[in-house]
Amino acid sequence: MASHLNTKQDGLWANIFAKKETSNTDVIDVLKNSPLFSTLNKSELKEFETITHLRHYQAKDVIFWEGEPGVGMYVIKSGEISVWDIKNEEKNKIAQLIEGDFFGELALLDEIPRSATCIADTTCEVIGLFQPDLFSLLSKKPSLGNKFLFQLASVIGERLVEKNKECAELRKRLTAEE
Protein backbone atom coordinates (compact mmCIF):
# COMPACT_ATOMS: atom_id res chain seq x y z
CA MET A 1 0.00 0.00 0.00
CA ALA A 2 1.41 3.40 -1.00
CA SER A 3 1.68 6.10 1.61
CA HIS A 4 -0.67 9.04 1.20
CA LEU A 5 2.12 11.39 2.26
CA ASN A 6 4.50 12.23 -0.54
CA THR A 7 6.89 15.01 0.42
CA LYS A 8 7.45 15.93 -3.21
CA GLN A 9 3.74 16.46 -3.81
CA ASP A 10 2.41 17.41 -0.40
CA GLY A 11 3.12 21.14 -0.05
CA LEU A 12 2.76 21.26 3.71
CA TRP A 13 5.31 18.53 4.38
CA ALA A 14 7.65 19.74 1.64
CA ASN A 15 7.74 23.21 3.21
CA ILE A 16 8.44 21.86 6.69
CA PHE A 17 11.41 19.86 5.45
CA ALA A 18 12.67 22.70 3.25
CA LYS A 19 12.72 25.09 6.20
CA LYS A 20 14.76 22.67 8.27
CA GLU A 21 17.35 22.23 5.52
CA THR A 22 17.52 25.99 4.95
CA SER A 23 18.01 26.59 8.66
CA ASN A 24 20.92 24.15 8.84
CA THR A 25 22.46 25.65 5.73
CA ASP A 26 22.10 29.11 7.24
CA VAL A 27 23.95 28.01 10.39
CA ILE A 28 26.77 26.54 8.31
CA ASP A 29 26.94 29.69 6.17
CA VAL A 30 27.11 31.92 9.24
CA LEU A 31 29.85 29.76 10.78
CA LYS A 32 31.79 29.61 7.51
CA ASN A 33 31.86 33.42 7.36
CA SER A 34 33.11 33.77 10.94
CA PRO A 35 36.88 34.11 11.41
CA LEU A 36 36.77 31.36 14.05
CA PHE A 37 35.44 28.80 11.59
CA SER A 38 36.89 30.13 8.32
CA THR A 39 39.60 27.46 8.09
CA LEU A 40 37.11 24.58 8.29
CA ASN A 41 35.85 22.70 5.23
CA LYS A 42 32.18 21.86 4.64
CA SER A 43 32.22 18.49 6.42
CA GLU A 44 34.04 20.02 9.41
CA LEU A 45 31.48 22.84 9.52
CA LYS A 46 28.72 20.22 9.54
CA GLU A 47 30.37 18.62 12.60
CA PHE A 48 30.28 21.97 14.39
CA GLU A 49 26.72 22.62 13.25
CA THR A 50 25.64 19.46 15.10
CA ILE A 51 26.98 20.78 18.41
CA THR A 52 25.69 24.34 18.15
CA HIS A 53 22.50 25.63 19.72
CA LEU A 54 20.22 28.29 18.26
CA ARG A 55 19.03 30.86 20.77
CA HIS A 56 16.41 33.55 20.20
CA TYR A 57 16.29 36.87 22.05
CA GLN A 58 13.94 39.82 21.97
CA ALA A 59 15.09 43.43 22.11
CA LYS A 60 16.39 44.29 25.61
CA ASP A 61 16.89 40.64 26.59
CA VAL A 62 20.15 40.03 28.45
CA ILE A 63 22.23 37.30 26.83
CA PHE A 64 24.61 37.21 29.75
CA TRP A 65 25.61 39.45 32.65
CA GLU A 66 29.07 40.67 33.51
CA GLY A 67 30.43 38.50 36.33
CA GLU A 68 28.49 35.36 35.38
CA PRO A 69 30.57 32.24 34.78
CA GLY A 70 31.27 31.86 31.08
CA VAL A 71 30.12 28.61 29.52
CA GLY A 72 30.34 29.32 25.81
CA MET A 73 30.43 31.71 22.92
CA TYR A 74 27.94 33.07 20.40
CA VAL A 75 27.88 34.02 16.72
CA ILE A 76 25.15 36.44 15.66
CA LYS A 77 22.98 34.88 12.97
CA SER A 78 20.63 37.89 12.83
CA GLY A 79 20.05 41.05 14.82
CA GLU A 80 22.21 43.44 16.80
CA ILE A 81 23.72 43.15 20.27
CA SER A 82 25.41 45.73 22.49
CA VAL A 83 28.29 44.93 24.81
CA TRP A 84 28.22 46.90 28.06
CA ASP A 85 30.53 47.52 31.00
CA ILE A 86 28.23 48.05 33.96
CA LYS A 87 29.90 49.18 37.16
CA ASN A 88 28.27 50.87 40.15
CA GLU A 89 25.05 51.44 38.19
CA GLU A 90 27.02 53.25 35.47
CA LYS A 91 26.66 51.82 31.95
CA ASN A 92 29.38 52.23 29.33
CA LYS A 93 28.83 50.82 25.87
CA ILE A 94 31.93 48.92 24.75
CA ALA A 95 30.84 47.63 21.36
CA GLN A 96 27.98 47.23 18.92
CA LEU A 97 27.84 43.78 17.32
CA ILE A 98 25.98 42.82 14.15
CA GLU A 99 25.24 39.74 12.07
CA GLY A 100 28.32 37.52 11.73
CA ASP A 101 30.11 38.96 14.77
CA PHE A 102 31.05 36.62 17.61
CA PHE A 103 31.48 37.19 21.33
CA GLY A 104 32.18 35.32 24.55
CA GLU A 105 34.83 33.12 22.95
CA LEU A 106 37.15 33.12 25.99
CA ALA A 107 34.52 31.04 27.81
CA LEU A 108 35.43 28.12 25.55
CA LEU A 109 38.86 28.03 27.18
CA ASP A 110 38.11 28.90 30.78
CA GLU A 111 35.05 29.42 32.94
CA ILE A 112 36.26 32.82 34.11
CA PRO A 113 33.51 35.34 34.87
CA ARG A 114 32.13 37.30 31.92
CA SER A 115 33.94 40.61 31.49
CA ALA A 116 30.91 42.46 30.09
CA THR A 117 27.12 42.33 29.78
CA CYS A 118 25.60 41.55 26.37
CA ILE A 119 22.11 42.81 25.59
CA ALA A 120 20.02 42.30 22.46
CA ASP A 121 19.19 45.61 20.77
CA THR A 122 16.81 43.96 18.31
CA THR A 123 15.17 40.58 17.91
CA CYS A 124 18.19 38.30 17.57
CA GLU A 125 19.05 34.77 16.65
CA VAL A 126 22.44 33.61 17.86
CA ILE A 127 24.37 30.40 17.42
CA GLY A 128 25.78 29.15 20.71
CA LEU A 129 28.81 26.90 21.06
CA PHE A 130 29.31 25.72 24.62
CA GLN A 131 32.41 24.41 26.35
CA PRO A 132 31.06 20.92 27.19
CA ASP A 133 30.08 20.36 23.53
CA LEU A 134 33.48 21.55 22.32
CA PHE A 135 35.25 19.29 24.83
CA SER A 136 33.13 16.36 23.66
CA LEU A 137 34.14 17.10 20.06
CA LEU A 138 37.80 17.30 21.16
CA SER A 139 37.60 13.83 22.66
CA LYS A 140 35.81 12.32 19.63
CA LYS A 141 37.64 14.20 16.86
CA PRO A 142 40.87 15.62 18.30
CA SER A 143 42.24 16.72 14.95
CA LEU A 144 39.17 18.83 14.19
CA GLY A 145 39.02 20.19 17.74
CA ASN A 146 42.68 21.17 17.64
CA LYS A 147 42.22 22.83 14.25
CA PHE A 148 39.45 24.96 15.73
CA LEU A 149 41.41 25.73 18.91
CA PHE A 150 44.43 26.83 16.86
CA GLN A 151 42.20 29.22 14.90
CA LEU A 152 40.63 30.46 18.14
CA ALA A 153 44.10 31.15 19.57
CA SER A 154 45.06 32.97 16.39
CA VAL A 155 41.97 35.20 16.50
CA ILE A 156 42.45 35.94 20.21
CA GLY A 157 46.08 36.78 19.47
CA GLU A 158 45.07 39.19 16.69
CA ARG A 159 42.62 40.90 19.04
CA LEU A 160 45.31 41.20 21.72
CA VAL A 161 47.75 42.80 19.26
CA GLU A 162 45.05 45.28 18.20
CA LYS A 163 44.23 46.16 21.82
CA ASN A 164 47.95 46.63 22.58
CA LYS A 165 48.17 49.09 19.67
CA GLU A 166 45.13 50.96 20.99
CA CYS A 167 46.67 51.11 24.48
CA ALA A 168 49.98 52.38 23.10
CA GLU A 169 48.16 55.09 21.10
CA LEU A 170 46.15 56.12 24.15
CA ARG A 171 49.34 56.20 26.27
CA LYS A 172 50.99 58.39 23.63
CA ARG A 173 48.04 60.83 23.62
CA LEU A 174 47.93 60.99 27.42
CA THR A 175 51.68 61.64 27.60
CA ALA A 176 51.38 64.42 24.99
CA GLU A 177 48.65 66.12 27.05
CA GLU A 178 50.78 66.26 30.21
Image (tube, rainbow, N blue to C red):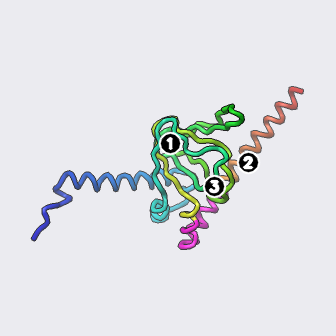
Q: Main secondary structure of the magenta part?
A: helix
Residue located beneath label 3 in the image: 107
Judge whether 153 appears above or below 122 on screen. Answer: below
Residue at screen point 67% across, 47% down: 67
Q: Amino acid at mark 1?
A: Glu
Residue located beneath label 2 in the image: 161
Judge whether 167 appears above or below 6 on screen. Answer: above
Residue located beneath label 1 in the image: 99
Answer with mark 1 or mark 2, whichever residue precedes in sequence: 1
Residue 51 location in percent, x, y? Answer: 48, 62
Q: Amino acid at mark 2?
A: Val
Front-most of 41 and 174? Answer: 174
Dot in front, 1 or 2:
1
Residue furthest to the front in view is 88
Residue 9 location in percent, x, y? Answer: 16, 56
The reply to whether callout 1 and callout 2 are in contact (CB within 8 Å) is no
Q: What is the CA distance from the residue labelled 3 to the residue labelled 2?
A: 20 Å
The reply to whether callout 3 and callout 2 are in contact (CB within 8 Å) is no
Q: What is the CA distance from the residue labelled 1 to the residue labelled 3?
A: 20 Å
Q: Amino acid at mark 3?
A: Ala
Residue at screen point 82% across, 31% down: 173
In the picture provided, is 25 more to the left or to the right than 39?
A: left
Secondary element at image label 1: loop
Q: Quadrant of the N terminus?
A: bottom left
Q: Which residues are magenta?
A: 135-154
Answer with mark 1 or mark 3, whichever residue precedes in sequence: 1
In the picture provided, is 163 more to the left or to the right than 36?
A: right
